[in-house]
Amino acid sequence: MKIVSARFAGSSTRTDRKPSPALPEFAFIGRSNVGKSSLINMLAGNHKLAMTSSTPGKTKLVNHFLINDRWYLVDLPGYGYAKLSQKGRDELRTIVRDYVFNSAEMQILFVLIDARHDIGAADWDFLCDLGENGIPFAIIFTKCDKLGPVALENQIARDRERLLESWEELPPCFLSSAETGKGKEEILSFIESILSAT
């Protein structure tokens, strides 16, 4: 798939206030500072599409970007913000859960995990919540350029083993780097295959 147009379509905090028209949605989420906005910009070929920041927790709304006038790329608030108040964390959790569990147009949720580290507790809890509720998801390991080939292979192998402790079958997994463009073709081809089947 080639992205020829990508534009901001609107923000919301509730599924009943999403942009129209209703189109297939592919959502992205992850812990703070996992590189979500950078990955979105890399996929879209527009480094200014999603707001990037060195300060965690900048995404506070559900942001829709219209891609090729065919589907939405959805940037969700992340999870695991240690510096937010409990009230702030609860508000973001409510926004995320409303979208993930109530958006009829969401085709799949891409969960971003930093390839440099073992799957963290916040990631694990979120993945288990998705599994228990039958939410379709895929995993994108980010920042793969930050590890050498052998270290990356070993880290991904450990993460896969951990996942197989709870899942009989692994979800779709992708390796990515916003710096090098790694994973762009594979992720967009995966989205195209889902669009073709709908």
Image (cartoon, rainbow, N blue to C red):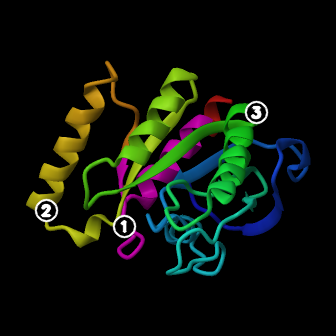
- Note whether 84 is above or below 156 in the view shown: below
Indicate the amino acid at tag 2.
Answer: Pro
What is the number of the mark on residue 177?
A: 1
Question: Which residue is the site of mark 2?
Answer: 149
- Note whether 44 is above or below 95 in the view shown: below
Q: Toward which corner of the image does residue 128 lie, by quadrant?
A: top left
Q: In the depicted view, which residue is nearer to us: 69 or 36?
A: 36
Question: Which residue is the site of mark 3?
Answer: 102
Q: CA distance from mark 3 to mark 2?
A: 39 Å
What is the number of the mark on residue 145?
A: none
CB under 8 Å between discs 1 and 2: no
Asked if residue 76 shows in the view, the reply is no
Name the mark nearer the viewer: 3 or 1.
3
Of the 4 image quadrants, the one containing the C terminus is top right
For the point 83% across and 47% down, which residue is it? 14
Task: Give the residues in magenta.
Answer: 174-194
Which of the two labelled residues, at mark 3 and mark 1, occupies the earlier sequence position?
Answer: 3
Which of the two labelled residues, at mark 3 and mark 2, occupies the earlier sequence position?
Answer: 3
For the point 53% across and 31% down, which residue is it? 130
| Image location (x, y in percent) of residue 124 | 39, 39
Instruction: Tell whether 33 sits left or right of 155.
Output: right
Q: Residues within 10 Å of mark 2 (few under 14, many from 20)?
A: few
